[in-house]
Amino acid sequence: MVASLSLLALTLLIFTGSPIPKYADTNTWFWLSLSGFVGYVFGDFCLFNAYILIGSRFGQLFMTLAPPTAAVASWLIFGETMSGIAILGMIITMSGIGISILSKENKDDAKSHSRFRRLHTSLPAKGILFGVGAGIGQGLGLVLSKLGMTYYEQCIPSSDGDVLSIMPFASTFIRAVTGLVGFILVMLFTRKTRTVLRATHDGKAMAAMVGLTLFGPFIGVSLSLMATLYTNPGIAQTIMAISPILILAPAYFLFHQKITLKEIIGAIISVIGVTMFFV
């Protein structure tokens, strides 16, 4: 969060002349901050705990709840509806993701506590709740972001095109502020501040964190808000949910991980589902 805020502030300074979002009013800060809490703090807290309790495969599987959550929330808040073919595309895409994820045999899962050997028949209730919370938090947080950006767009003068074009990055800045405050409170409550401070002495981890920050909270999240701004959040979230499919090629070429036939079939099904949004 600190690193992403630094990059976002530098971007805003270069393009708008101010390191903090210009023209953002109280409504903008409120809804984008709420989005940051729901998406960053609540959603990610649930997701990381789901990884610990039920493993990454099942944790990612529950993230397929995000697209329908975004679609329903968008309908309730904005009155936006999806066409029949878009709904079918969503179902097909999520089915492909499910097939691909469930075919994986993660090393983390295999090396975990013995209870993970029972995951194919039963999952811990606490892990399921965290997984559901992660999916709902991700989808709802995205819709709240669109609501915040709607208010923000109304505050920006039409004559200031630079601020308007960089609005998703300014919105991400506001969400990141909430994320930083929220996670500091979580660390204080769970007494993990010393753990985080010790982690900063790991050079390799910090180098990886820089790359993670660049492509995740800085570029990735900002582009996700841009996608949400220009299309239905349910469609945007469905397309973003194919990340488990997109990592198959890097996993094969960089880490030489074996890709199974089910993963390939799941990837093909997901791509077919995504293309239906553009028919």
Image (cartoon, rainbow, N blue to C red):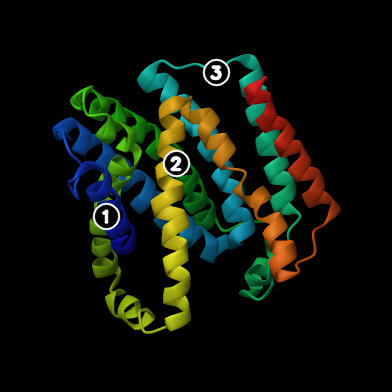
Q: At which x and y percent is residue 216? A: 45, 55
Give the residue drawn at x 22%, y 42%. Answer: 16
Answer with left or right where residue 7 lies relative to residue 79: left
Q: Which badge, 3 or 2, is on the more N-terminal residue? A: 3
Residue that carries the numbered disc 2 in the rendered image: 223
Q: Which badge, 2 or 1, is on the more N-terminal residue? A: 1
Residue 82 is labelled as 3
Answer with left or right where residue 33 lies relative to residue 126: left
Give the residue drawn at x 29%, y 25%. Answer: 150
- Which of labels 1 and 3 is toward the front? 1
Give the residue drawn at x 38%, y 46%. Answer: 39
- The residue sitting at the right extreme is 261
Q: Amino acid at mark 2?
A: Leu
Crowding at label 1, few (<14), some or many (≥20) Cα neighbours within 10 Å? some
Q: Quadrant of residue 251?
A: bottom right
- The answer to whether mark 3 and mark 2 are in CB contact below 8 A is no
Q: Quadrant of residue 158?
A: top left
Total numbered labels = 3
Q: At which x and y percent is residue 34? A: 27, 41
